[in-house]
Image (tube, helix red, strand yellow):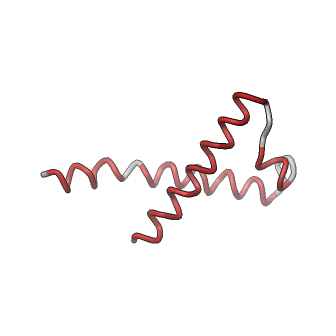
Amino acid sequence: MKGLDYTALVLTIIGAINWGLVGLFKFDLVAFLFGNLSWFSRLVYILVGLSGLYLCTFFSRLADNNA
């Protein structure tokens, strides 16, 4: 489970950096690297989104550890 946690965290950080670049400079790093909405860039966006949803479970895990 720890490997999944780290993978999700890394993907979410990549997504956050990408959104920061889009907001500050109108530069989409994922599209630049893999093509504008190519199948691979879409896969990256999907994995980042799923990782964000998965990381929402951290709230319940933190609550369980503090109880």
Query: Which of 33 and 36 lies nearest the eye of the viewer?
Result: 33
Q: Residue at x 66, y 37 (%)?
A: 19
Q: Residue at x 20, y 56 (%)?
A: 65
Out of 44 and 23, give the one closest to the viewer. 23
Total labels: the figure holds: 0
* Residue drawn at 47 percent across, 67 percent down: 4
Quadrant position of residue 61: bottom left
Image quadrant for the N terminus? bottom left
Q: Quadrant of residue 22?
A: top right
State the image coordinates of residue 26 (x, y, percent, origin top left): 79, 30
Q: Is residue 63 toward the left or the right of residue 30 in the image?
A: left
Identify the residue at horizontal 77%, vertical 46% (top origin): 29
Q: Residue 28 at x, y = what percent?
A: 78, 41
Q: Residue furthest top?
A: 24
Q: Nearer the viewer, residue 31 or 25?
A: 25
Residue 56 higher or lower than 22, as above or below: below
Tell me: 5 left or right of 25.
left
Q: Position of residue 15 (x, y in %)?
A: 63, 47
In the displayed structure, does residue 38 sit left or right of residue 61? Answer: right
Q: Is 34 situated above or below 17?
A: below
Query: Could you tell whether 14 is left or right of 56 in the image?
Result: right
